Amino acid sequence: MSGRNNYKKIPVRYQNTFGECFGHGFSTRTGGVSLIPTLSSLNLFSSSRRRDAEAVVQENRRRLAVHAGFHPLSLRLVKVEHGSRVWVVGRAEPGSYDAMVTDRAGVVLAAPGADCMPILFADPRSKVIGAAHAGWKGTLMGVAMATVEAMVTEFGCRVSDIMVAMGPSVGACCFTLDRQQAQDFLRIDRGCVPDPESARPHVDLRLANRVLLQRGGVLSGHIHDHKEMQRCTSCHPEDFFSHVRDGLNFGTQVGFLWIRGTD
């Protein structure tokens, strides 16, 4: 297995964005174990297509948990369907969804990403959190604001109190769509599609999500998009997994967030 000597070298980014009552971060691809080159080394997801054994993925999750400071069994990953459904933790769990919210301390919400963007949400006043997986389809369906709206509706949060951290994603430099699909992003903001007349226009998922969040009332200053996270996942194989770059056998990094206990 690759990565045996990297246990103490797991880079976790963004750990202080939301304040001391929350723990959170975004994983990279280093510091874990894997049997497959494109999944090496801190792959955090296993499926029939991506054939890191479940035991390998569980070990990687354990390593991340120990490094970040939470219990591995408290980690909950969204069950991606590339939509905008939001699960309120504690209610009957849907078979698939792209976001979840909770006010329970100790439950670690995690959203996967490998070009798609993990987005984290926190309300320091109400102590409510959310995590969303925003691919291009989910972005268009409004998964980011659906998460905010669930925090408001279910827990009484105020939109103006909610803070957002945007994780790594594919950049407009590498992500293209059919012209008809790109038109939907052009309607969000012209800056989302720098070359609309191309046969396959480039699309800026980061800008689209930022614009939609700001239109929904999230304060611009509350949307954190650190320079480190703006690096394109496809362009930086040393740090990030990428579906665009690696094809179907791609690894997965995550954004994760929890409310610290008071005891």
Image (tube, grey):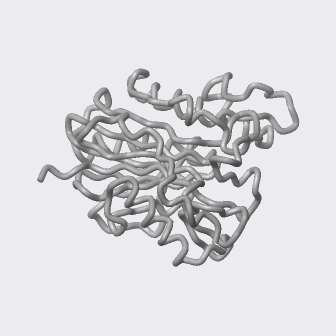
Residue at image x 47%, y 46%? 12
Residue at image x 80%, y 43%? 178
Can residue 183 be seen from the camera position used here? no
The image quarter containing residue 157 is top left
Quadrant of the drawing holding the N terminus: bottom right
**205 relative to 64, above or below:** above
**71 relative to 148, above or below:** below
Residue 210 in percent (x, y) is at 52, 30
Residue furthest out toward the front: 5
- Which one is nearer the viewer's eye here, 16 or 220? 16
Residue 23 is left or right of residue 224, and the answer is left
- Which one is nearer the viewer's eye here, 215 or 7? 7
Task: Give the total number of marks visible in the rendering.
Answer: 0
- Which one is nearer the viewer's eye here, 162 or 87? 162
Residue 212 is left or right of residue 198, and the answer is left
Can residue 176 be seen from the camera position used here? yes
Residue 131 in percent (x, y) is at 41, 49
Residue 122 in percent (x, y) is at 32, 40
Residue furthest out toward the left: 263
Residue at image x 23%, y 45%? 155
Residue at image x 33%, y 55%? 69
**87 relative to 179, above or below:** below
Residue 205 is left or right of residue 181, and the answer is left
**224 relative to 5, above or below:** above
